[in-house]
Image (tube, rainbow, N blue to C red):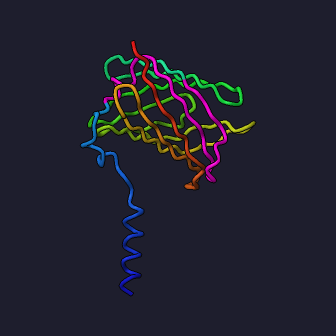
C-alpha cells in the first residue's frame, strides 16, 4: 500500500505543469522588445508524435517596435519547397505579458515572460495538404545569449498530442 501511495504521489506531482515564473531567476533576462527587434533567422523542424521529422524549415524575420507594439514579419521556406508568410502584431500588456494577433491565428495569442523564458499559447489555422486545421500551440522560448534563442512548441488538437516544433533563432548582428 505504501509503495502505491508513493507511486500515485509521484505520478501526480510529475504531471504538474511548469509555469513561466519557474524561470524568473534564469538569465540572461529575455526582453522581447530587445530580442525581437531587427533581422533574425530561425531554423527548425516538425516532429510527428512518433518522433519522425516530417518537415524542416527556415524562417527569415524582420521585427520592429513602436512603443508597446511590435511587428514580426516572418517568411517561411520549407524543405518541400513550399513557402508561407505570417505577420504578427504583438502588444506588450503588463507584468511581462503579451498579446499577439496574426492572419492565421484564431483569436489572440497570449504570452508571458519571466527570466530567460517566454511562453506563448495560441490556436493556428494550419494548412495541411488541401485542408486546414485549428491546432493549439504551446510555445516555449528560452534566451541562451544575446544572439541565440531556442524554441520548443507542442502541438495538439482537441487535447490530442500531434507533435513538436523545434527552432533555433539567430539574431543577426548589425
Number of labels in the image equals: 0
Q: Going by the image, does 37 lie left or right of 107? A: left
x, y (%) of residue 123? 53, 41
Specify the quadrant of the image occupied by residue 146: top left
Q: Nearer the viewer, residue 135 or 78?
A: 78
Specify the quadrant of the image occupied by residue 100: top left
x, y (%) of residue 29? 28, 33
Q: Nearer the viewer, residue 84 or 101?
A: 84
Q: Going by the image, does 55 lie left or right of 66? A: right
At 44% from the left and 21% from the top, the residue drawn is 71
Specify the quadrant of the image occupied by residue 10: bottom left
Eyeballing the image, is 162 above or below 66? below
At 59% from the left and 25% from the top, the residue drawn is 76
At 46% from the left and 29% from the top, the residue drawn is 169
Decide whether residue 33 is among the magenta residues.
yes
Residue most toward the right? 130
Decide whether residue 40 is among the magenta residues.
yes
Could you tell me which quadrant the C terminus lies in?
Answer: top left
At 39% from the left and 20% from the top, the residue drawn is 37
Specify the segment rendered in magenta.
31-59
Eyeballing the image, is 3 above or below 66? below
x, y (%) of residue 23? 30, 45
Q: Going by the image, does 162 lie left or right of 122? A: right
Main SS of the magenta part reads strand
x, y (%) of residue 36? 40, 24
Residue most toward the left? 25
Residue most toward the bottom? 1
Could you tell me which quadrant the N terminus lies in?
Answer: bottom left
Amino acid at each position: 500500500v505504501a509503495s502505491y501511495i508513493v507511486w500515485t504521489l509521484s505520478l501526480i506531482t510529475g504531471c504538474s505543469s511548469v509555469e513561466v515564473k519557474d524561470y524568473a531567476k534564469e538569465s540572461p533576462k529575455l526582453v522581447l522588445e530587445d530580442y525581437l527587434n531587427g533581422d533574425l533567422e530561425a531554423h527548425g523542424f516538425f516532429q510527428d508524435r512518433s518522433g519522425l521529422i516530417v518537415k524542416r524549415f527556415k524562417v527569415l524575420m524582420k521585427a520592429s517596435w513602436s512603443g508597446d507594439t511590435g511587428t514580426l514579419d516572418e517568411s517561411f521556406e520549407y524543405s518541400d519547397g513550399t513557402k508561407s508568410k505570417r505577420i504578427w502584431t504583438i502588444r506588450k500588456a503588463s507584468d511581462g505579458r503579451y498579446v499577439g494577433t496574426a492572419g492565421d491565428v484564431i483569436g489572440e495569442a497570449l504570452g508571458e515572460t519571466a527570466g530567460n523564458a517566454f511562453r506563448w499559447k495560441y490556436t493556428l489555422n494550419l494548412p495541411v495538404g488541401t485542408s486546414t486545421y485549428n491546432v493549439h500551440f504551446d510555445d516555449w522560448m528560452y534566451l541562451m545569449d544575446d544572439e541565440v534563442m531556442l524554441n520548443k512548441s507542442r502541438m495538439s488538437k482537441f487535447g490530442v498530442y500531434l507533435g513538436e516544433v523545434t527552432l533555433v533563432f539567430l539574431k543577426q548582428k548589425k
